[in-house]
Amino acid sequence: MKKQSSTISVQAGKIEFVRKNSIHLGWRDLYRNILSLTWPRFLLAVLAVYLLLNLLFATAFTLGGPCLAEVPQGSFPGAFFYSVQTLSTVGYGHVYPKTAYGDIVTTLEIMVGMFFTAAITGLIFVRFSRPVAQLLFSDHLVICHYNGMPTLQFRVANLYHQTMVDAEFRLMMVRKEAIDDEEDARRFHTLKLEYDRLILFPTALTIRHVIDETSPLFGVTPASLESSASRFMASIVCVDTVIPASVHSEADYLWSDVRFDHRFVEIYHEHPDGRMEVDYGRVHETELHPKRLFRLEK
């Protein structure tokens, strides 16, 4: 089959990319497309295929004349419900084929029903068994004073009730930069983190990038972020100890999502017995930092 070009929409965080003249993979990409559907759309697709198959076989039985016992000739409802019984291999026995034509169509439907049931069972199993990261990223990035240095920070929380392990954190920035005679060239910069790996990831963490002389953000201001259309992409890969399997989650931030001279509010409280209380309801909350780095206009 010859590959066909088409226009495809790809969502990457808050940005939508529209591919023109892209190669359409056709049937080879059908499996991935089905798995990428949301549960409501997946169930609607299964229901649509199920009804379509029964309508097709009911039409075939209806056109076959008196091929079904106990079903009036030309009765589409009777043929349809016989098809439902046959496709699901229920076979109550009240209705049965009484001609060679009916036997042939029934045999074909039984074979289709076996493949359909096996395919749907496999897809449902994969959808349920596929690990999904339940990680919560803060709504904003902040740039504030931390340990004597300006620092870019975001917060992430583990929503599972079990500790994640071998967590790896990454943060990247993309912005427009002038390169030789080119304009609006986009450059990607990996931002070095205060720590990028943790053995245990039980609750919530604040991830930090120190803005020193070696940082691509050195000398950053709100105006420079806006003029360069800066974006930030954060990702986390960790191991779910229940399944166990690696899970991945990501978030992206626009320049307008960066709050200068703000810090994340404290969400940890230590009890006298040593227990640590974490307030997940305040993961996104920020407050003005007492040591301001910037004098922003109101």
Image (cartoon, rainbow, N blue to C red):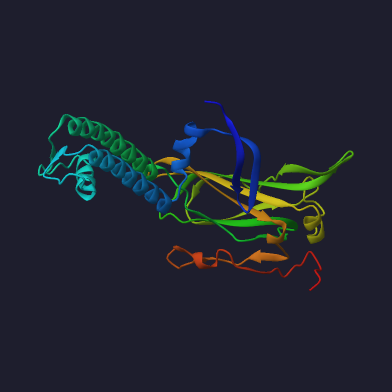
Quarter of the rendering containing residue 286: bottom right
Q: Position of residue 231 (x, y in %)?
A: 70, 51
Pick the quarter of the image with the C terminus: bottom right
Compared to residue 252, the image places residue 279 above or below, namely below
Compared to residue 124, the image places residue 286 above or below, namely below
Can residue 279 be seen at all in this image of the molecule?
Answer: no
Foreground of the two, 77 or 262: 77
Foreground of the two, 71 or 270: 71
Seen in the image, is 135 located left or right of residue 192?
A: left
Q: Position of residue 79 (x, y in %)?
A: 21, 45
In the image as oriented, which residue stretches furthest toward the top? Answer: 1
Compared to residue 52, the image places residue 278 above or below, namely below
Compared to residue 160, the image places residue 59 above or below, namely above
Q: Residue at x 43, y 40 (%)?
A: 245
Q: Residue at x 60, y 61 (%)?
A: 139
Seen in the image, is 102 located left or right of residue 214?
A: left
